[in-house]
Amino acid sequence: MKLIAAAALLAAQNPSPPVACVPQQEVADLTITLLPAFIDAAGPHCARHLGAGSFLASREARAMAERLRAEAGPRRESAARGIRRIVGNEVPAGLSGTTMLSVLSEGMIGQAVSGLDEVKCRNADKIIRSAAPLPPANIGDLIAAIGALAFLDRPPSDGAPPICPA
């Protein structure tokens, strides 16, 4: 968490020009890169709300995470560009894009999972269960397109750039 705060502080001291939008391919690659860690963390967390029979707590969810992990390697550079666009183009000296991705993803995943209550766990469980049969590329494309559609008429409220429309 201290590294995340340091990265945010450095970015705030060296503001970058605003990015108009994040390309869908970078969002798709970011999804494929981060989703395995989300599944790993959300499984035990949501099992407390949904029971051990939830999809997120299942062997099938772990297999999905492994399939995504196997696809993530060549997508990490693109995913790092996406995260850099989201948090700002300034990367602290000596911190590569992929290192920044790793550092920031831990905090992002932890924050996302800690905010999952029973209702959000049910929805996350349904989304992951529904996406599980899809090839990784389709999962990434689907999430990117839904994200772009969600911000078509309004920018994200947190100041992050929207996802570029198709």
Image: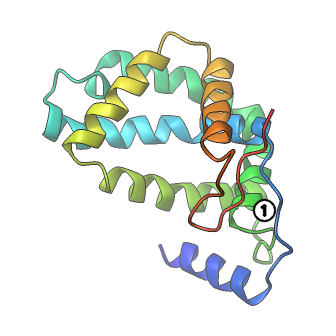
Describe residue 18's horizontal placement relative to residue 136 as left or right: right
Q: Residues within 10 Å of mark 1 (few under 14, many from 20)?
A: few
Question: Quick one: which residue is furthest to the right in this view?
Answer: 17
Image quadrant of residue 69?
A: top right
Q: Which residue is mark 1?
A: 96
Task: Identify the residue at the far bottom of this view.
Answer: 13
- Residues 14 and 126: in front is 126
Query: Which residue is found at the position 44% from the left and 41% from the top?
Result: 38
Give left or right: position of 90 versus 110: right
The extreme top residue here reads 133
Q: Nearer the viewer, residue 65 or 11?
A: 11
Residue 134 location in percent, x, y?
56, 12
Q: Could you say where residue 31 lies in the image, as x and y percent from the top left?
A: 61, 37
In the image, residue 83 sits, relative to residue 38, either above or below, namely: below
Tell me residue 114's x, y (percent). Answer: 31, 56
Answer with left or right where residue 36 lies relative to residue 39: right
Q: Position of residue 79 (x, y in %)?
A: 73, 45
Q: Residue at x 76, y 38 (%)?
A: 24
Name the quadrant of the C terminus: top right
Q: Quadrant of residue 115?
A: bottom left
